Amino acid sequence: MIRAATAALLACVFTLPAAAETVAITGGRVVTMGQSGEIERGTVVVRDGRIVAVGAHVAVPPDAKIIDATGKTVTPGLVASGTALGLIEVRTVETTDDRGTSARDLSAAFDAGYGLNPDSLLIPVARLGGITRAIATPAYDDKAGRELLFAGQAAAIALDGAPMLMRRGVAMVLEMGDAGAERAGGARAAELVALRAIFAEVRDFKARRAAYDRGETRTYTLSRADLEALVPVVEGRMPLLVSVNRASDIRDVLALARSERLKLILEGASEGWRVASDIAAAGVPVLVTPVENTPASFEALGATLSNARRLGEAGVTVAIQGNGNHREREMRYNAGNAVANGLDWQAGLAAITINPARIFGLSDRIGSLDPGKDGDVVVWDGDPLDTLARPVAVLIRGAEQPMHSRATELRDRYLPTVLSPANGEKP
Amino acid sequence: MGLADKLLRGGRATTLTTTLATALIFTGGGAFAAPDAAPRDAFPSTYQAAAQPPFAIVGATVLTGTGAEIADATVLVRDGSVEAVGAKLPVPEGYVEIDGRGKWVTPGIIDAHSHLGVYPSPATPSHEDGNEAVAPNTAEVWAEHSVWPQDPKFRLARAGGVTSLMILPGSANLFGGRSVTLKNVPAVTTQGMKFPHAPYGLKMACGENPKRVYGSKGRSPATRMGNVAGYRKAWIDAADYARKWDKWEKDGRAGDPPKRDLQLETLAGVLNGEILVQNHCYRADEMAVMIDVAREFGYKIRAFHHANEAFKIAPLLAKEDICVATWANSWGAKMESLDGIEETAPMIDAAGGCAIIHSDDGLLIQRLNQEAGIAMTAANHAGLSISRGEAIKWITANPAKAMGIADRVGTLEPGKMADVVLWSANPFSVYALADRVWIDGVPMWDRSDPRYQAPSDFLLGQPGQEFAR
Amino acid sequence: MTRRLLALAALAFATSASAETIAIVDARLMTMTAAGEVERGTIVIRDGRITAIGPGVAVPVGARVIDGRGGTVTPGFIQADSTLGAVEVSQVPASADRATHSAAISAGFDISLGLNPDSILLPVSRLAGITHAVTTPLYDDRGGRDLQFAGQAAVIDLAQRPDMVTRPRAAMVLEMGEGGAERAGGARGSAIVELKATLADVRHFAAHRVAYDRGEGRPQKLSRVDLEALIPVAEGRMSLIVKVDRASDIREIIALAREEKLRVIFDGAEEGWRVAADIAAAKFPVILDPLADLPHSFSELGATMENAARLHAAGVMVIIKTGSGVAHRARELRYGAGNAVAYGLPHDAAVAAITVNPARVFGVADRVGSLEAGRAADLVLWNGDPLEPLSQPQAIFVEGVEKPLTARPLELRDRYLPR
Amino acid sequence: MRMRAITVIAAIALAGCAAGERPQPSVAPTAEASAPPIDRDPYPSTYRAPAAGQVALVGATVLTATGDEIANGTVLMDGGKIVAVGAGLTVPDGYARIDARGKWVTPGVIDAHSHLGVWSQPDSVEANNDVNEMTDPNTAQVWAEHSIWPQDPGFDTAREGGVTTMMVLPGSGNLFGGRTVTLKNVPSVTMQGMKFPGAPYGLKIACGENPKRVYGGRGRSPATRMGNVAGYRKAWIDAQDYARRWDKWEKGGRVGDAPKRDLQLETLAGVLKGEILVQNHCYRADEMANMIDIAHEFGFRIRTFHHANEAYKIAPLLVKEDICVATWTNWWGYKMEVFDALEENAALVDAAGGCAIIHSDDPVLIQHLNQEAAAALSSAWRAGIRITKADAIRWFTANPAKALGIADKVGTLEAGKNADVVLWSADPFSIYARAEKVWIDGGIVFDRGDPAYRRHSDFLLGQPGETR
């Protein structure tokens, strides 16, 4: 045991992410989430960062580094939606928190794709939970009594070091329900009215940009930057990611999106199951945290562990989220709990791979093990959704990632003192 | 019937001694005989388990909480107590037989750190009663007076197998107040949930929280050295108070008794060994300082809570016989938790210490088994060798020890209270669900029977309650 | 337990109109139409619609018969000036959507958006015979707000269904008198001058929308949303609910309304009886709380329980409400009406004051407020005089849907009821 | 008729001013005392009963509040007392006979929870708000009677609703709000002229949200419910200590200096001695259970839980402890701690054998306590609970009298009791019933047929609407 610990120590000091090379992962149960379905014993070949072959009878290229996955499970890298990865180090240390702005004239234009920190020590921790990509999502900073409605734009990131930005502006983030109402003056109706007014403003602005610049349009409540940022939203090109929980709020948001012709993503949706058919009919995907089952507020009285299952059964595309900030690695357990409460296992895995990839328009690159896609692959020593399993190899864009984090380094530093108390209190 | 009496008798071995000691020090007799002195039990438990026919769980894999894993085992429960546990025991006549084949049985889950009832759902200011954040020392407040028994989370925790839990005041203050240990049974009053004769705890908090709360108000403590000065001043006062009462007692109670002081009464209870110190403390260096403070004033720390850095001083903690209640997953929310690792509990265990996985959270309390599973798996990946039989103690026997109730719960040994969970699968798996839960042999949760799934009064008639969960 | 769960399920899902035929027989029928009161009659309901009503109506074969002997059928009651659907716990701000303190939204505040059909207050009120409410915005002055209007009220139903809004934007709410003065700088004069200025702004805006959108209009103090919302008020198409109590304030508003050609609904009007003839001449209806007999402020020193009776006698259309912005205690509506009777209002006028009168004033009389063949059934069968506390509803229909006689407090009761 | 009435009123009003003699202090000085005794009654009642003749109410349905409903009943009053109640009694000579056929008679309505006079109309005027001394969690030293404005027009409207007696409490912002006072609802210029002679004081205690919000919001204790409990317990420890010091001085023959008086502790010590009744604002069942344990710990009794919307959850406990429950029917939901309120609360307490009270806490509701009780009764019937009108009448007569410690004097129509009587136009459980005549101690204080009895308050003289 001590030998293992020492080896790990050495490994963590000297291992840097391996450069993209040719890797063949052989002999494992491959759950592709893509066109090849599930392969009982298969091989995945990754070259130059891309998946080049997946199948039961794929030849291993002679130059390939072989990862023996016999008896193990191979999945696409997990995609975490709604995270603070890259934006935060210690929540209560404000200088390390870049999730939101308190600027009074910056709302929709705030872009989480700026200022990302690829050296964040949260990233290896998340990676050890099998997460290879994430949606870095802005949060509100209400310290200054801010009344602006939008938190800003989310960005897709990769967890394999710099540069980590994958795609900018994958969604516009808006909180509704209790918190949104609070920000809009304390009532839900106020926010709904304000939003309609804002969308009208944006459309007006879009049609009269030149006049605006001549100072000849009517006065807008939003700044030019915010107006510009919202143009793709009103055009239905950028999804509006709305945090909302109460069933009636969800219906209101769906109605708003319908009348304003918006592309919508729902987040939270604790009572989503109660209006699942409405959501399904609207073709709107939902990001849920399936373990959140307490009636934590009056908008979540109907919260239940069966939310994900019920949404899935109604035909809603569901993505499952982690537990926020430092706890994204629990995303797969959340999916496991959804499965334990009735969600189909494949659907559970889809909810943390291909579904979030699709929802954020990234499925051309990630989310499944299909030839041509990025080489994001995780090898597990058991069921990836179970607490009893761990990743034994993680590839991002074809590169094997180090299997340690600051936490495991700490662990390994102190393991000897634990195992040999006679050594004293400190190593 | 006499089940309640039996429960009281069961608890007598340690608690009666403790109670008598209190009586000697503070009252020298019945509480109401000398109304000026502290009563022994001002808010007595009214919890009584209902009588049940004896039953047997047959064929399950049993984790006893004593380290053993027994395949194809039989668990016999009679009169609210565990009667026998063993492989393929015969089932006596008259026992209701429960088929446990393919399933697992563990002692009831015990959460050593919860705020259920004092921070209920939904979170409204009117319900939030967990932190009397008005002074750095509020040892005079008792968490039980803030518990709202209708917090819907009690029922959710029950569905997660939690049968006992310690409710603590929050961590804003150096001395937050007394904790209370509850049986996780539905009740209208807090007294109806109180674990009979469980000792009180004193919540203490190190580090960032007190210094932030009071420092930001321009009051002491504003630094960690201010924290320590605050603890020490309080213990000096408490020692003085305890001495005055001792003297009055030794002088044959002549003259007026010293005037009672609720704050010092609690601290003196710690000095006298009746109240257990439950200390929120993250950093290894601060824990070492707290141990020195305890030595200076002659009390014991029963458990460090959260204790993300406990693994750095595991041998010290083992030597001092201080339990470590912590998580696998929580880390990094603030500076003092930055060094949190998944393997803290197993490393404490490996060093011979008392490791506990706790929740501090309304979601995690429903899945303490999974959190323990994560820690166990991470540890085994790191080269430690932790068995399931050992790891189950982190959420059963060890928290029972930290809470001073290990003589009655935490393991499946004959004579213990029959707090039992029947799991659908290996309890460390994410797929394991608590199929049935008994508290003192009384069925309290059954995943297939709505009679045991009734929600809190609060949720009656609320939207979205069409099915039980 | 199982029974309770079933009841819960029933509560949640009993929203589709039943396809059965129901006959309520041998009941006293208060139709609130020209047909008046039928001492003993029958109502036939098929597929949620009233197909026949009156004495001597035959019971169709196969109909479920509800014995109405000794009972009375009324239209569903309408609680005017409530916050039903917009509040759960008054002192929990997150559950209260009655008002905004947004600096940019005043008249534009539209309470019909964001209402909660799952509110547990709805079945509680329904058990008191209330099937509709005029959900009315309140002021939120936390931010030192000085906007004039509380926003727009909506008529809702209490069926607990997603489309709960019977009529959105049914009226604009404005407080004058003491409160209005406070919000406009502390003097009644300033409030009225400001109101006139606002109406002038709105009319200008209505005539120059295009220029406004070109940024060429005159500077506007109100937001565009507010201006748009006020156009129907300025044009006399939308009623303006004016909260006012003092007799002199009522007179001022009548004069202002004449000049500006506004449609006014008085709300409160505790001294209304003192200027009853003026109100009757102006043909403005009055919403009042019959129990308000205390001199709460210097604007209501003349408050009396006989206000309703005296206004009615003077020919004013009276609408009875319970308190102001009431939600949890909306169920006391029928007791308020009963007290008005005890203090001189004719019984049929009191029932009209909580049925057909508010229906007419808020523009929903074609759907609710009276009992006529061809309409969706919106009615309550009582086991006695509906205004008596000792009477209870025996059957409740909201816009064609029969609702169960349950609510959360009854479930709680059953949990603790000694068995 | 009108002239006579005015004379009566004048007599009543003057009663307050004409108090020449002060009753003796209840603690008589002892010879060897080295210090002056404490005057236990420093603001004594100067109430004098209105002129009372011999009156017979004949032919009414009488609810005696002892459990009987008497058809065709006769109630005889003489010298301010009830002389006899029964079916078809013979009216003795000399009695003024009032035809009450078709009408109903009950004891005078008693409100166990009112703020009339301490939060007077117009209540939008801040100067009229003297209800809450919210400067410290413990203000046991203040007495509600010192905030009373006898000209509150609310007294008049309450009388028109049949209210003859009420307890006025300080507000609920503090853990200990101060002493309550029990008033006869008679017009008076002074507070002393309304004080119910011999009624014990109450101590207002408040649980739950209010104190923790008020003081927690100021960064002071209590900020939580556990802070509330620590606050109560600390105060009772101080009170025990204080009481012991005084006892010791008394037992020691009053030698040496008396302990220094402390107004706050004097009130609390009065509770420990059983002289002052605890009137406890407390909504939640679990909090009531905590308060009961505190009472056990320090050896006092709680007389009444007020508001107590969750009393039905622990009805047997409250019965066992003999604690009254004063509550509403219709109020609920305005804050979290009233979320679980039921219309049936009073009825469920009653059905468990307890002392149920319908109270007002409100200047409008106090005028309609009979209707609030009717709604409660109706809900009970809906729930299948068998309670008669004869039982339910106790909720606003006999039971509040018990809670206020004056059940030996008022609350029922029994021979020997004070003649506080209401003649109703109809069944008092009907919405249409109105109090037609009201007597206090046998003297008429309200007559709906006589305008002279309406709106006595000086404040409304010459005001708009005065002549209604």
Image (cartoon, coloured by chain):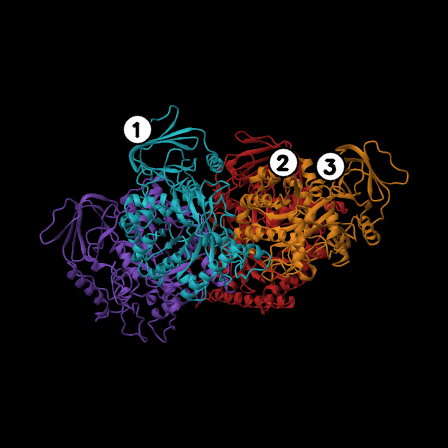
Tag 3 and tag 1 share a subunit: no
User: Toward the viewer: C275 or C303?
Assistant: C275
Which quadrant would residue A143 be assigned to in this image? bottom right
> What chain is colored cyan?
C
Q: Chain of mark 2?
A: A
Disc 3 secondary structure class: loop
Q: Colour of chain D?
A: purple
> Does C25 sit above or below residue C358?
above
Instruction: Say the numbered circle drawn on residue A315.
Output: 2
Residue wearing tag 3: A33
Q: At x 41% / y 66%, what residue is drawn?
A: C189
Image quarter of the N terminus of chain B: top left
User: Toward the viewer: C249 or B360?
Assistant: C249
Q: Earlier in the sequence, mark 2 or mark 3?
A: 3
- Real-space Cα separation, disc 3 to disc 1, in angstroms: 70 Å
- Label 3 or label 1, whichever lies nearer to me, is 1
- Real-space Cα separation, disc 2 to disc 3, in angstroms: 17 Å
- Label 3 sits on what residue type? Met
Does any portion of residue B92 appear in the rendered image? yes
- Label 2 or label 3, whichever lies nearer to me, is 2
Horizontal relation, residue D261 to residue B133: left or right: left
Residue wearing tag 1: C56
> What chain is colored red?
B
